[in-house]
Structure formats: structure tokens, C-alpha cells
Image (cartoon, rainbow, N blue to C red):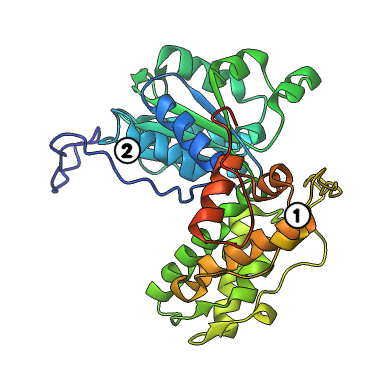
């Protein structure tokens, strides 16, 4: 291959035959997780810009990658642009590239990320951090598909699908004059909310197991989680979401590189999330059944430590809310139907009736 300066490059070009659908990296079976996957897969079937909104550490980049992998552009590149590190001086050069000699230090031509994403997906992470002075340049590139590298004399074009993400309220920023309204409408054609980890608490055991396996592949031992350790994780709000869970598990593995991770090894910050909604006061059930709230699991010997911990947590909630199934389901962030299936699966000694079809 020859570049614009006549420099010869030797290499190879690989092209995928077809576009096999990649397995999702988003783990979990909570109602909020399943709803999210449904939204992401619908978005993947279109070319419309997507705006992902979620708290820090909730997995916005993973969601963007899922959209890319499930789309017709899966065989193309997935380019991540971290807007938090793009200053006004760097933005144009990093996103659109520059020509040799365009400024001091530009000793060679540079291809920008907008062009590198040609035929694929451009992920603009934390788009709310983009300086407002640079927003018109991004808007023009998105509207026309063309751009001009810094110092160049000709426009270039790139066919990209744009997915953006932010933890900020962009609509409020528009009202404050810190984010352009036209750019906001261009980016937010398909807005998708990423649920915080506390809204998909049911997924915590599975995520913790995945993180343990991930760390073991890095040579950090092969520890296991005790029942008490899992229960402690289930009762925490995780203001830092999955990123915080990863750090907590990493520390626990460092403390127990080859043994069982105990409750004491799960070190949580003293302060809980201020964003988390306060837990509602348990209301007595009109017809409580105290005799049915025995804290026992009939088939405990057939359950894994993770399953046993979840079963015990469900029983704890049943006791806390006096058997009120609606409140227990809310505490688990699942539907009453899902709760019923779990009670049957774990053969918990609780008298329940099958939910009505409309529940």
C-alpha cells in the first residue's frame, strides 16, 4: 500500500466472510437486564444514532459494543472516543486527523478516529464532556459524513454509525447553554437508559463469578465465594456499579488468592450511594403466614454456593416483608412471576400461589 507521501507499507488485509452474530458480553437474567438487551438489539437493527445514559461504571461501553456486534456493521471497526481526554486543542486532530506539517510536532499524516471508524461504529463516550466550541464541528461531520483533517486542503468522507454515552443530563445542559440543542437531537434519536447495578441486584452473583474466573485467568489464583460473602454483596448498593464490583472482587482475591473468600474479605465503603433510593419500610401483609416463613432450603445439598446464597437472601426478604410477595419481588428487582419460579426452583418452605397471568 502507498500513503499520500509515497511511503510503501507491507502487510495483509483480512476480511470476514459474512457477519456472524457475536455472543453477548452482557451477563445477567434480571428483568432490567433482559429489558436492556431487548432495547439494544432493536437499536442494532437500525442505523439511527443511539444515546446511552447511565451512571458511571454501569457498562455503557459494553452496551455500545453489543449494539455494534449485533448490527450489520459487526465486521467493521468499533472505535472508542473518550471525550473526557479531548481538550479543545486535541479534539479536531484526534477525531478528524491532521496533515503533515499542519502544526508544530505534526511530523507525519495522521488518520483521525472518524475515518478509522469508516464502515463500522464510532462510540463517543462521555459526550457531555465535549467542549461546546468543538460541538459544531462534530455536528457537521455527523450531518454530512464529510470532514477535513487539520491542515488538509480536501474533504474526506466516512460512513459511520454513531453511538454516544453520558452520565450527565444533556437535556438540562441544553437549557443551561452548555450543550448544543441541534447536536443533542442529532445524537439522541434512540435514547436508551442503562440500569444501575442496584436495579439488577439479581445479577450480582453471576457477575461476581464471572469476575472471579476472569481474575483466575490472569494468574491470580482460583478462589471461591462463600455464602456469607455473596449475601454481603447482595445487600450493597454499588454506587460505582459494575466497575466498583470488579474492584471489590479484585481486592478480595488479593486477600484470598487460593482459598474461600469470606464475608470479612468483602471490604465495602462505609458510605452507601446517595443516588440509591431509600429502602421502603416493610408494610405488614394483610394475611401474613408466619408459619410459612421458615428459613430453610429443602434441597440445599443440590445447590451451588451462589444459588444457596440467593435462596437465603430471598428467605431473608420474605421474613423482612412478612411474606409480601410484591415487596420481595421489588427488593430483588424482579417480577412476581420470576419470584414465584425462584421459590419453586429452590423449593423454599413458603406457601405461595401461582401468580395470575396478568401479574
SS for dot 2: loop
Q: Nearer the viewer, mark 1 or mark 2?
A: 1
- Quadrant location of the C terminus? top right
Q: Between residues 235 and 283, which one lies in front from this camera angle?
A: 283
Instruction: Give the camera-side residue of 101 and 2.
Output: 2
Residue 179's x, y, as percent?
Answer: 69, 23
Q: Classify 10 Å Cα crowding around label 1: few (below 14), some (14-19), many (20 and above).
A: some
Between 338 and 267, the one nearer to me in the picture? 338
User: Where is 312 relative to 85, above or below?
Assistant: below
Task: Name above or below for residue 157 compared with residue 82.
Answer: above
Q: Secondary structure at mark 1?
A: loop
Q: Quadrant of the N terminus?
A: top left
| Numbered marks: total | 2
Give the image location of residue 43, x and y in percent: 43, 25
Q: CA distance from mark 1 to mark 2?
A: 58 Å
Q: Which residue is mark 1?
A: 289
In the displayed structure, does residue 115 sit left or right of residue 30?
left
- On the image, numbered disc 2 is attached to which residue? 77
Quadrant assignment, res 192: top right
Q: Looking at the picture, how far across and down is residue 118, in whole percent?
A: 32, 29
Q: Is residue 258 left or right of residue 145?
A: right
Please tell me whether residue 27 is drawn above or below residue 290 in the rendered image: above
Pointer 2: residues within 10 angstroms few (<14), some, or many (20+)? Answer: some
Amino acid at each position: 500500500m502507498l500513503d499520500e507521501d509515497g511511503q510503501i507499507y507491507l502487510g495483509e488485509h483480512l476480511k470476514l466472510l459474512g457477519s456472524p452474530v457475536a455472543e453477548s458480553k452482557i451477563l445477567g437474567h434480571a428483568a432490567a437486564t433482559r429489558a436492556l438487551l431487548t432495547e439494544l438489539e432493536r437499536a442494532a437493527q437500525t442505523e439511527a444514532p443511539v444515546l446511552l445514559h447511565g451512571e458511571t461504571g454501569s457498562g455503557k461501553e459494553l452496551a455500545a459494543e453489543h449494539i455494534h456486534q449485533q448490527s450489520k456493521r459487526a465486521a467493521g471497526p468499533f472505535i472508542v472516543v473518550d471525550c473526557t481526554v479531548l481538550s479543545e486543542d486535541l479534539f479536531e486532530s484526534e477525531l478528524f486527523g491532521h496533515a503533515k506539517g499542519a502544526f508544530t510536532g505534526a511530523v507525519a499524516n495522521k488518520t483521525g478516529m472518524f475515518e478509522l471508524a469508516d464502515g463500522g461504529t464510532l462510540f463517543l463516550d462521555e459526550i457531555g464532556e465535549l467542549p461546546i466550541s468543538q460541538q459544531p464541528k462534530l455536528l457537521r461531520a455527523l450531518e454530512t459524513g464529510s470532514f477535513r483533517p487539520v491542515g488538509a486542503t480536501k474533504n474526506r468522507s466516512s460512513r459511520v454509525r454513531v453511538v454516544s454515552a453520558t452520565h450527565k443530563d444533556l437535556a438540562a445542559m441544553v437549557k443551561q447553554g452548555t450543550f448544543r440543542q441541534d447536536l443533542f437531537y442529532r445524537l439522541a434519536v434512540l435514547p436508551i437508559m442503562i440500569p444501575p447495578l442496584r436495579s439488577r441486584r439479581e445479577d450480582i452473583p453471576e457477575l461476581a463469578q464471572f469476575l472471579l474466573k476472569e481474575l483466575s485467568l490472569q494468574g491470580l489464583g482460583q478462589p471461591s465465594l462463600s455464602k456469607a460473602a455473596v449475601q454481603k454483596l447482595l445487600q450493597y448498593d454499588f454506587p460505582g456499579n459494575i466497575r466498583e464490583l470488579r474492584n471489590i472482587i479484585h481486592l478480595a482475591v488479593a486477600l484470598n488468592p487460593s482459598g474461600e473468600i469470606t464475608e470479612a474479605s468483602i471490604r465495602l465503603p462505609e458510605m452507601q450511594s446517595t443516588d440509591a433510593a431509600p429502602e421502603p419500610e416493610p408494610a405488614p401483609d394483610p394475611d401474613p403466614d408466619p408459619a410459612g416463613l421458615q428459613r430453610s432450603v429443602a434441597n440445599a445439598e443440590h445447590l451451588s454456593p451462589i444459588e444457596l446464597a440467593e435462596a437465603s437472601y430471598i428467605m431473608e426478604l420474605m421474613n423482612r416483608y412478612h411474606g409480601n410477595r410484591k415487596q420481595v419481588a421489588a427488593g430483588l428487582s424482579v417480577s412476581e412471576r420470576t419470584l414465584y419460579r425462584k421459590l419453586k426452583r429452590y423449593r423454599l418452605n413458603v406457601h405461595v400461589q401461582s401468580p395470575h397471568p396478568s401479574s
